[in-house]
Image: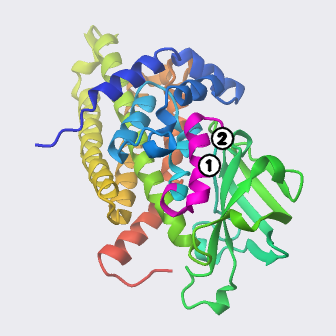
Amino acid sequence: MQTHDHAEIRDAIRALCAQFPDAYHRRIDAERGYPEEFVQALTEAGWMAALIPEEYGGSGLSMAEASVIMEEINRCGGNSGACHGQMYVMNAIVRSGSDAQKQEYLPRIASGALRIQSMGVTEPTTGSDTTQLKTTAVRKDGRWVINGQKVWISRVQHSDMMILLARTTPVDQVRKRSEGLSCFLVDLKSAIGNGLHVRPIPNMVNHETNELFFDNLEIPEENLLGPEGLGFKVLLDGLNAERTLIAAECIGDGYWFIDRASRYANEREVFGRKIGQNQGVQFPIAEAYIEVEAANLMRWKACAKIDAHENAGAEANMAKYLAAKASWEAANVCLQTYGGFGFASEYDIERKFRETRLYQVAPISTNMIFSYVAQHILGLPRSF
């Protein structure tokens, strides 16, 4: 039977995370800051270069191994959302970049000299309806001129580059709505203030996200990533990796909540007995554990499909749905087990509670996953 222990990776990540205990992440959350020291430590240890081929200075690990890194960060009480983009965004360069782009960017990403953590896709008026996006890229005098708006774009302030999706052929001139879209590499350091304006969006979880405004932003012609007009396909290479890695993060969160709830239920005494002796307390924890374990199986299936270079769209979506749902249910059980103490910041439950709630909504909502499964797996009519 195939196992997914990856004990060496788990031990190494746990040892690194031990240098950044709960108090560190609690302080960063309270300050609405960015865990720069933590991300730098992961980068210097080579973990952020897990999916970059060895020939470009990366570790050349499998998706399964990379997912363990993300899982363990969250299982140790951290939040991979601060850095997971560095692991999966560059996957579009690995899969679709030219030889020149791979040589130019991947070694620097692997070393940590270049951060590419942002993917500019979502827009205020289109949301998840990516094929209807309004941002345009027009070729002019050997350069691309970008105009439009994006929203909910993460880690822009902590990235050097961004992958941007824009329409290069009007939607009324293509056979399918997914055609005529192209991906671009945007140098954020030179773009901001020179055609790109960034507005941070305060939110309920300490997750740096932004609204972007493009006003005649010019980028070099060679910054086109992949074939012109096939950007949607280029994007999918990154999105399947994103959803699978986030599923692993949710698995890590789920185990964290279950561990905390079980420990507290074994320690807390009320009415002369441990609260964990009560079925009303232990049964929900047991149910949450079963759900996380089941979601974990789909996570491994998605990893296997990606590592085999097969279409993993269905598995990646289902893994993300199941893991996000399981972690959210485990969060509720943990908070209920702690009672009033669960709302106190010092126990970290409320922080992790907010963090894992995000994944019911983003990076793809539950309803969009239902729609994907209904249409592409069950053969039902397209619902939108």
Image quarter for residue 311?
Answer: bottom left
- Position of 71 relative to 209 (above/below): above
For numbered disc 1, what is the local secondary structure? Answer: helix
Q: Nearer the viewer, residue 228 or 175?
A: 228
- Badge 2 or badge 1: first in the primary sequence: 1
- Position of 94 relative to 224 (above/below): above
For numbered disc 2, what is the local secondary structure? Answer: loop
Q: Which colouring convention does the figure follow?
A: rainbow
Residue type of the residue flagged with mark 2: Leu
Q: Are marks 2 and 1 in contact (CB under 8 Å)?
A: yes
Image quarter for residue 280?
Answer: top left
Give me the residue at 42% from left, 71% from top.
Answer: 371
Question: What is the number of the mark on residue 105?
Answer: 1
Residue type of the residue flagged with mark 1: Tyr
* Residue 100 inside the magenta-drawn segment: yes
- Whether residue 329 can be seen here: no
Q: Nearer the viewer, residue 267 or 61?
A: 61
- Position of 319 relative to 183 (above/below): above
Residue 329 located left or right of residue 180: left
Please provide the residue range marked out in magenta.
Answer: 94-114
Q: Nearer the viewer, residue 363 or 173?
A: 173
Give me the residue at 34% from left, 56% from top.
Answer: 306
Please, which residue is most extreme toward the right here?
194
Question: What is the number of the mark on residue 114?
Answer: 2
